[in-house]
Amino acid sequence: MLTLIARRLVVAIFALWGIATLVFVLLRVLPGDPARTILAASGASETAIAQARQQMGLDEALPIQYVRYLWNLARGDLGRSLFSNRPVLLTIAEQLPSTFELAAAALTIAIMLGLGLGILAAWYAGSWLDRVTVGFAVLGVSTPLFWSGLLLIWLFSLVLHWLPASGADSWRHLVMPALLLGFVGAAPLVRLVRSNLLTTLQADYITVARGKGLPETLVLLRHALRNALLPGLNMVGLQAGFLLGGTVITETVFARPGLGRVVVDAILWKDLPVVQGTVLLIASTYVVINLGVDLIAMVLDPRQRES
């Protein structure tokens, strides 16, 4: 068990290193000069832009920038914003509660919808309820977030006047973005739970339980759900990371404060340290959540300890 945990930790560390490296490389190969972007509006001269590049450390060779970047990460230093000169860690800390609030609400909705509708679809397989549920899952997977967000704003804000279209001042501002992300996150969970539960209900031990005269509800709750929902646990971990990343689009559509707005503005301004820090935080959270899910799955299912 300890060997498996150590192996997963090593894989997680290498995954974070790979993500940090990928973000560093992609931001350097994209067109645009951060110093020129920041100073262009003020009509700065080429000499001033060159001095700004030197102060930002952008005039050094890429290998030197990369080594310094990794060294700072190892020390927990995410750098300072090229635009505001504020520590990136402080900027992230200010916006993190709003983003985690949205992601947590969306994940709760996704789990409730995913498990509930998946179980109903399997229990009434072949019925109209099953077909509607599968259609719901397909719609959730295939609909773009930004389009769905604009549709919700049009319907509930402009037409019905039920909910505010933007901001984060009260729980009413959280309803639409959380429902949007939760709906999208629930879709693959519905399909997975339905498929696994249908397979489990055809297993031999389920037939034996039915042969003992147990009620169908007891067969489902006591014998089928536990084995059917274990793969769904891994899907919950994947969806948690997806929903955290999905806040980037959702916060932008609903003009909601959070890491999403920060990273979009940073990309537009080529604020490299802010983009690197924010993306690395989201990726780290994703890796940690899935590591925790893997460990929980190993505790609940002894067969995974042997694989």
Image (tube, helix red, strand yellow):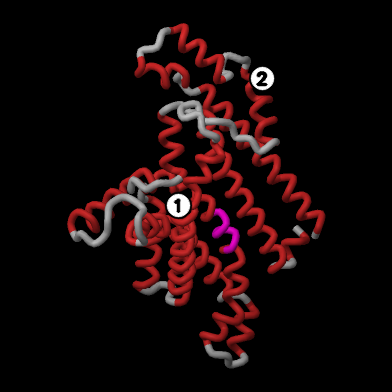
- How far apart, in angstroms, are the residues tagged by discs 1 and 2? 35 Å
Residue type at mark 2 is Ile
Give the camera-side residue of 120 and 207.
120
Residue 64's tag is: 2
Query: Between disc 1 and disc 2, whose residue precedes?
Result: 2
Residue 46 in view, yes or no: yes
Q: In percent of the image, x 46 and y 27: which residue is there?
A: 83
The residue under label 1 is which amino acid type?
Ser
**What type of secondary structure mainly makes up the magenta span?**
helix
Residue range in magenta is 233-238
Left/right of residue 202 with respect to residue 265 in the rendered view? right
Residue that label 1 marks: 98
| Residue 271 in the image, given as x and y percentages of width and height | 48, 28
Indicate the quadrant where residue 201 lies: bottom right
> In the drawing, does residue 223 fall left or right of residue 148?
right
Residue 237 belongs to magenta span: yes
